[in-house]
Image (cartoon, rainbow, N blue to C red):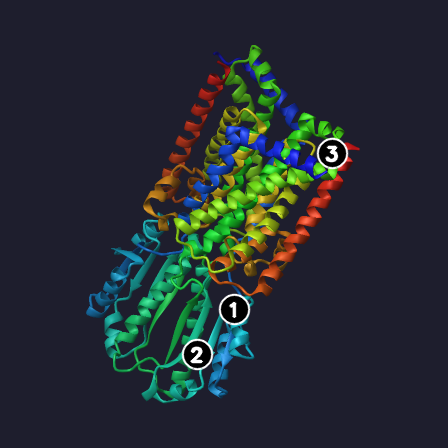
């Protein structure tokens, strides 16, 4: 029996490898994508265009402006009237405007409370949030330095664990390992079974001595191999090109990835076993893939989701791999965490492969 | 190649019949956008509430408890006392809390005596996700500052002339991430729907040979492409309309622009996406490869390189240039402006021009490869 399955696996792999277009699709896009996306995914704020509307001719005001101009976060230009502020924000010429009122210097010198305004373009709310916190820290520093003799009553010392320099790429790269390898193993397995059924070659396979379950194994293993190849290609790029640290156990990562690609292949096979045509299988992949990526916490934290959406996301294998990949790369996680996040992958694989087997048998019978 | 109206009408009737007979096109146009919009709209949120932090308090003191209460009063933070430092660190490693606040034994005393200022507390943050880490640090600092000011006023020790930053957020005053994510998601949905409609369906026609037999009929190639694009265009526009209505009703995103500008932008983008799908299916020659290419070329680039999630202005210069080749970026920019700001022509017109160029380019490329394929 194992010989038969092995023969089928080899046939499948040869089929994938023989076609230059498929070979290209398996090898090139994951590498190109990881190079593009890891650079694209930046939460760093540098050279944000900032309009300064300074109504105060005093020294204090120009000192504050100098601080903003000196910060790498901002690129300062002057605006002079309310309608200029409006126009500059509307047209995205500036991302934010700092307004210093006329009485600013006078108020400060007289020891009265005063304030400056910071108006951000919240069409891009995430940037707005970041930019505001930079502005707040510049203003706080300015206020502090006016009283060099009196230290602040309290200081909060922050230490960033696992990613001390707050590299955006350290966050996104483990995510890309999970997302891109899943998409590929799902795609390959969904399409291959659906194609055989549309072309009628699936029935031919079934009249051979192979049993349906064996055919399924023969279809699953090549999809897993493709997923593993892609995952490791991306890992190599991440480690060598982006210098992503690896602090966990490599063997553990590979084991978990194996389970993960099995879950991905399971979803792909289940979709294609239920679908009647390649088109329907593909539609299934499209409908499932993007929600799976989003619900995994790849871009925005799972905790921020509404409870119902978060709960639905528990069926998403990428979600578990996301936690595992980030933990294994950046922190050498406790084994309990690895166990907590791995067993759901096994359950997903088991359920989807069972669905695939039942649906495939029904389709033939 | 004179287009005959009569032939065109016949072709359109055939396409409509085909669309109605095969559920795939209807599913792509209506099921896909609804699922994607609902899940992505609710799923991508940068609005963090109740971020969990563990508090390791070595000082049992009224003042410190007051500080913890002040932190706990923030809607963004959920402060939980930890039994020990080891327990807190374990919780951080397990991802159960996002940060640890450490208050040492000497803290209250140093806070009470100006001579020993500043009293220091430590915040350790799980910075695996740097964005959330920064937001958390901002919230903790903010809550502490408010608490300190209250304390200072009480003790009368805060130096006069306080300086504060008044923050205002235009276009989206509450910084609701749905308001800025949903317009981006619509662009992503349209990229996928438009490309998928033509790439999958036409690839099947090539694979089965029905495309060749159509071309052998008296209909010219331009007529065929026109009839196909026309029908899918109507379908795509309906799907766009549905997405916009869903954004306004289900997500409560305001729409401040004009319907005319929205129509023109959607139409140009759809022509691009449909022609691009046609291009893929013609070059790929079979469904297997066409679907792989359509999948890889649309979903992730539209998500990562369009400015929907990540600000293009913050990307490295060379990558900013690459994003010019991702037409979704123009649609994202137009939609975010139309939804949240209104008809700001300084933003809309250049992006419309870029969309028109992308549409023209995709059409020209499609005509070219279709002709070549027949030779």
Instruction: Write down the chain letter for disc 2.
Output: B
State which mark lies toward you, 3 or 2. 3
Chain letter of the residue carrying label 3: A
Local SS, label 3: loop
Q: Nearer the viewer, residue B215 or B225?
A: B215
Q: Quadrant of the C terminus of chain A?
A: top right
Protein chain holding label 1: B
Q: Which quadrant holds residue B25?
A: top right
Q: Earlier in the sequence, mark 1 or mark 2?
A: 1
| Residue designated by label 1 | B92
| Dot 1 crowding, Cα within 10 Å, few <14, some 14–19, many 20+ | many
Q: Residue at left 52%, top 69%?
A: B92
The percent position of residue B101, horizontal first and vertical second, equals 47, 75
Q: Nearer the viewer, residue A17 or B233?
A: A17
Q: Is residue A344 shown to the viewer in this render?
A: yes
Q: Position of residue A156 (x, y in %)?
A: 39, 75
The residue where tag 2 is placed is B147
| A340 or A86: nearer the viewer | A340
Question: Do the residues marked 3 and 2 share a common chain?
Answer: no
Q: Nearer the viewer, residue A253 or B228?
A: A253
Distance of label 1 from label 2 (alpha carbons)? 26 Å
Tag 3 and tag 1 share a subunit: no
Residue at the extreme right of the image, as rendered: A365
**Labelled disc at residue A210:** 3
* B182 with respect to A212 (left or right): left
Say few, some or many: other residues with alpha carbon within 10 Å of mark 3 (under 14 / 14 to 19 / 20 or more): some
Label 1, secondary structure: give it: helix
Q: Position of residue A112 (x, y in %)?
A: 29, 78
Q: Quadrant of the N terminus of chain A?
A: top right
Q: Is residue A274 visible?
A: no
Residue A304 located left or right of residue A101: right
* CB contact under 8 Å: marks 3 and 2: no
């Amino acid at each position: 029996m194992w010989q038969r399955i092995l023969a089928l696996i080899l046939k499948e792999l040869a089929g994938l490898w023989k076609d230059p277009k498929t070979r290209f699709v398996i090898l090139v896009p994951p590498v190109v994508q990881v190079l593009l996306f890891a650079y694209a995914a930046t939460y760093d704020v540098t050279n944000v265009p900032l309009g300064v509307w300074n109504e105060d001719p005093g020294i204090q005001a120009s000192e504050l402006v100098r601080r903003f101009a000196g910060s790498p976060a901002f690129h300062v230009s002057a605006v002079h009237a309310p309608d200029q502020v409006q126009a500059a924000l509307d047209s995205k010429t500036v991302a934010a405007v700092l307004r210093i009122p006329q009485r600013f210097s006078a108020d400060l010198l007289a020891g009265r409370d005063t304030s400056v305004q910071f108006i951000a373009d919240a069409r891009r709310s995430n940037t707005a949030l970041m930019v505001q916190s930079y502005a707040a820290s510049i203003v706080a520093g300015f206020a502090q330095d006016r009283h060099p003799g009196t230290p602040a009553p309290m200081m909060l010392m922050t230490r960033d664990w696992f990613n001390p320099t707050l590299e955006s790429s350290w966050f996104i790269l483990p995510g890309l390992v999970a997302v891109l390898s899943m998409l590929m193993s799902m795609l390959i397995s969904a399409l291959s079974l659906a194609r055989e059924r549309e072309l009628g070659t699936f029935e031919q396979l079934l009249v051979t001595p192979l049993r349906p379950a064996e055919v399924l194994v023969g279809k699953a293993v090549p999809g897993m191999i493709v997923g593993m190849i892609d995952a490791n290609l991306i890992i190599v790029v991440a480690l060598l090109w982006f210098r992503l640290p690896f602090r966990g156990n490599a063997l553990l990562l590979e084991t978990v990835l194996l389970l993960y690609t099995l879950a991905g292949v399971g979803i792909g096979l289940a979709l294609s076993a239920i679908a009647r045509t390649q088109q329907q299988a593909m539609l299934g992949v499209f409908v499932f893939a993007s929600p799976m990526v989003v619900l995994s916490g790849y871009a925005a934290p799972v905790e921020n989701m509404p409870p119902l959406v978060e709960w639905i996301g528990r069926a998403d294998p990428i979600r578990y791999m996301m936690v595992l990949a980030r933990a294994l790369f950046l922190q050498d996680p406790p084994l309990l965490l690895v166990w907590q996040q791995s067993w759901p992958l096994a359950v997903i694989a088991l359920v989807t492969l069972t669905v695939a087997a039942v649906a495939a048998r029904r389709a033939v019978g | 190649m004179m287009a005959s109206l009569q032939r065109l009408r016949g072709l359109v009737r055939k396409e409509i019949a085909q669309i109605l007979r095969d559920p795939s096109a209807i599913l792509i146009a209506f099921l896909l956008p609804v699922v994607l919009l609902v899940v992505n709209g609710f799923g991508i949120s940068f609005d963090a509430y109740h971020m969990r932090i563990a508090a390791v308090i070595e000082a049992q003191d009224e003042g410190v408890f007051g500080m913890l209460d002040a932190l706990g009063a923030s809607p963004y933070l959920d402060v939980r006392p930890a039994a020990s430092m080891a327990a807190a660190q374990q919780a951080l490693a397990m991802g159960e809390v996002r940060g640890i606040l450490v208050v040492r034994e000497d803290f209250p005393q140093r806070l009470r005596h100006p001579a020993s200022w500043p009293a220091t507390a430590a915040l350790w943050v799980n910075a695996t996700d740097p964005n959330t880490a920064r937001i958390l640090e901002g919230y903790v600092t903010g809550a502490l500052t408010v608490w300190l000011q209250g304390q200072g006023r009480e003790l009368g020790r805060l130096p006069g002339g306080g300086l504060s930053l008044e923050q205002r957020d235009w276009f989206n005053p509450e910084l609701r991430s749905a308001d800025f994510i949903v317009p981006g998601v619509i662009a992503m949905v349209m990229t996928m729907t438009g490309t998928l409609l033509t790439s999958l369906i036409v690839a099947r026609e090539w694979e089965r040979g029905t495309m060749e037999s159509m071309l052998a009929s008296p209909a010219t190639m331009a007529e065929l492409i026109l009839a196909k694009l026309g029908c899918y265009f109507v379908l795509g526009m309906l799907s766009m309309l549905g997405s916009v209505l869903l954004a306004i009703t289900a997500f409560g995103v305001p729409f401040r622009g004009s319907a005319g500008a929205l129509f023109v932008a959607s139409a140009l983008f759809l022509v691009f996406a449909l022609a691009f799908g046609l291009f893929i299916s013609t070059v790929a020659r079979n469904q297997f490869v066409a679907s792989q290419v359509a999948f890889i070329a649309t979903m992730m680039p539209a998500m990562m390189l369009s400015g929907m999630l990540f600000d293009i202005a913050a990307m490295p210069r060379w990558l900013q240039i690459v994003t010019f080749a991702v037409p979704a970026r123009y649609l994202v920019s137009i939609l975010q402006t139309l939804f949240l700001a209104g008809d700001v022509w300084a933003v809309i017109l250049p992006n419309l021009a870029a969309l028109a160029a992308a549409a023209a380019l995709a059409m020209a490329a499609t005509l070219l490869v279709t002709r070549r394929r027949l030779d």
